[in-house]
Each structure stands twice: as structure tokens, then as C-alpha cells.
Amino acid sequence: MSRHRAPSSVTRRGALVAGAAWVAGAFAASSGLGGRWGATAAPSAAPAEALAAAQVPPTPAGTPSTPPTASPTTATATASATFDRTAHSTGEASSPWVVVNKQHPIVPADYEPAQVVRVAGELVSAVAAPDLEALLAHSRDDGVALTLVSGFRTHEYQEQVHRRSVARNGQAGADRYSARAGYSEHQTGLAVDFSSADGSATLSPRFGETDEGLWLAEHAGAHGWLLRYTEADQAVTGYNPEPWHFRWVGVELVAAMAAAGTPTLEQFFGVSGGPDYA
Ligand SMILES: [Zn+2]
């Protein structure tokens, strides 16, 4: 499906770098903070919008006459300038932007999504289902055989998962591979674990190199699904890389994070994380 095709890698990298530099400038200009991510508020919108007015041509994004090569950059810059990081809570379990990590358990501990639906055999929060269906349909169109091996998990089930992992790997090992009950994104109903139809790399680091894992890394974001635990971000997320674990946050947030050059929810929202439990 051509509408999902990214521009050439050179163009895309250029757009991302431009977006990241642009946002970094806006951030520094408006917050005056140093190298650390602001622990309190996101930069206020006014200076960033002023900067946008100065740097972005006044052509509205999506205008039919916009040249195709220019529109992604323009749209990205505009999106990052006007993006409201406070539009949804990062603390409420039912929020599409909730940040769940070892410093931020789910509240209340026995939280369950208001409505869960079954997609490809797994339960997910109803709010994430349409984008998941679209992602799976897109993958089928591209001839990629994705399956789901996990979705929504209750607090009780996560307790069993973690207890089994402790028995196998010891507490320290288990804490790098599976969340303690109450600290798993799966309990929000907004996270899924993918695999391939042949199952050969299920929940394995090798999944990242399979056709399915590579396809997800490239296309999941276009459907609002974020690769949550990467090699590079282990210190921030507190988890070993999980190329199979994706978190639904919506396409707008994925785009804003890419434009800001911040790959993790923790960095984008200035929320603490890391390997140690609170
Ligand atoms: Zn997972």
C-alpha cells in the first residue's frame, strides 16, 4: 500500500534530523533546561509556535499543491510545534499515553480496561483495536505473516508470568525480562507481543531479524504502535530489548516522538524510568 511507504531512507533521515534539531532548539529556547529532560513541565507552547511561524512556510500541511517531497518535513515540523504534550494524562491507566514502568506502577493495582476486544486471538483494549486491525491488514497486504502471542493480561496473570520467570531466571534475571505484577504495560490492554506464523523466534531476540520483526520496526509506527524496548534505550526503559513488544499510543504521538527525536515515552514526557523498582 503506497500510502504507507516511507520516503527514501535518505529523505526520511533528513526529515528526522531536521525535526529533531528543530525541536531541540525550540526546547532549549523555551525551557532553558540543560541536558536532562525536564522533570516538571513540557516546554510551553507559545515560544515553539512563534518559532514555527518563523521557520515553517505558511502553506497548510496537506494542501494538494504541496510537492510530495516537501510535505513530510513540513507536516512533521508543524506537528511537533503544535503538539500538546498535556492533552492526555501519563499517569492514568486508561490514558492512551500512560507511562508504565518500574518507577510507575498501574494505579489502581487491579486496573482493567473498560472494554477489551479480541483481535487475532488476543484481548486488547477496545481503543487500540482499530489500529491493530489496520496494522495486521497492512502486513497481510505486504505478505508478512504476523501473529499475536500476548495482549491484555490481568494483574493475577502477570503475577503468574513473573513468578514463572523468577523460578527460571532468579529475581534479578526475571526483572530484566518480565514485569512484576502491577508494572506491566500488558495490564493496560495497550500492549501486544507479536510473533511470526512459523513461531520460530517467539519472544526471542532473533525476532528482530525476521521478516516480521523487520516489517514491524518499519511500519508499526504508521499505525500508532511504538517499539517500546530497544537495545539503545535499556537504561531508560529498564528492560532488555524486546523486538516483539509494541505499545499502542496513537499515530499522532508516534509522529511527535519521531519529530522530537525521543524514542521513549519516558524521554518524551519527562517521566522517570530505569531498571530499579520504585
Ligand atoms: Zn510484551
Image (spheres, rainbow, N blue to C red):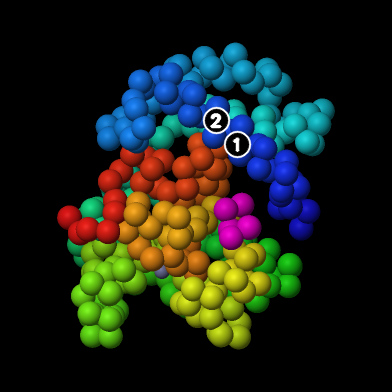
Q: Is residue 21 magenta?
A: no
**In x, y percent, where is residue 34?**
34, 27
Residue occupying the point 73% across, 41% down: 11
Residue occupying the point 68% across, 17% down: 58
The numbered dot on residue 17 is: 1
Q: Quadrant of the C terminus?
A: bottom left
The amino acid at mark 1 is Val
**In x, y percent, where is residue 13?**
66, 42
Which residue carries the number 2 mark? 21
Characterize the magenta stretch by its predominant secondary structure: helix
Q: Seen in the image, is 117 located left or right of residue 135?
A: left
The segment highlighted magenta reads: 217-222
The amino acid at mark 2 is Ala
For the residues bearing labels 2 and 1, Cβ distance under 8 angstroms:
yes
The numbered dot on residue 230 is: none
Q: Is residue 32 visible?
A: yes
Q: Is residue 195 above or below residue 99?
A: below
Secondary structure beneath disc 2? helix
**Where in the image, quadrant-wise, is ligand 1 located?**
bottom left
Q: CA distance from mark 2 to mark 1?
A: 6 Å
Place residue 144 in its image quadrant. bottom right
Q: Seen in the image, is 99 located left or right of residue 217?
A: left
Q: Is residue 183 above or below residue 251?
A: below
